[in-house]
Image: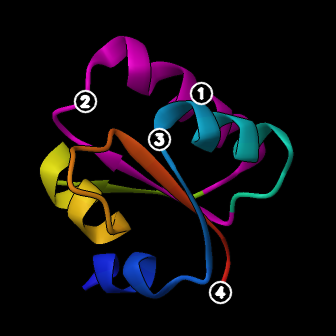
Amino acid sequence: MPLERLSKARKKVVGSKQTLKAIDRNQAKVVYMARNAERHVMDPIIQACSSKSVPVIYVDSMQVLGKACGIDVGCAASAILEE
């Protein structure tokens, strides 16, 4: 299950703004995105991933992604920085 890799990652960022910063700084190894996140939140991250060749893994919902990140609220995006 791909979320197991995210929950066990030692270094990760949680949230769309932090994920976008990590991509821009070439720190993100893989990005996780919630399918039900709003388009205006997802589009800049998808574009950044495309331009930097960072793989994107889509998760069913923001709640599922938040839980995998170890937080009690929904999360639109997250990234693994290293394993």
Q: Is there a contact, CB below 8 Å, between mark 3 and mark 2?
A: no
**Residue at the (84%, 51%) spot, across then down:** 26
The image quarter containing residue 76 is top left
Magenta residues, start to end: 29-54
Q: How far apart are marks 1 and 3 (CA)?
A: 16 Å
Above-or-below relation of 78 to 4? above
Q: Mark 3 points at which residue?
A: 15
Q: How far apart are marks 3 and 2 (CA)?
A: 11 Å
* Image quadrant containing the N terminus: bottom left
N-term mark: 1 or 2: 2
- In front of the other: label 3 or label 4? 3
Q: Mark 1 points at which residue?
A: 47
Specify whether residue 36 is painted magenta. yes
- In front of the other: label 4 or label 1? 4
**Rendering coords of residue 55 (x, y %):** 55, 58
Q: Is there a contact, CB below 8 Å, between mark 4 and mark 2?
A: no
Q: Which amino acid does label 4 sit on?
A: Glu
Q: Say how the picture is coloured.
A: rainbow
The image quarter containing residue 81 is bottom right
Q: What residue type is labelled 2?
A: Ala
Callout 1 environment at 10 Å: few (<14), some (14 to 19), or many (20+)? Answer: few
**What element does badge 1 sit on?**
helix
Q: Mark 4 points at which residue?
A: 83
**Residue at the (46%, 21%) spot, across then down:** 43
Q: What residue type is labelled 3?
A: Gly
N-term mark: 1 or 3: 3
Q: In this view, does 4 lie to the left or right of 28?
A: left
**Rendering coords of residue 24 (x, y %):** 80, 37
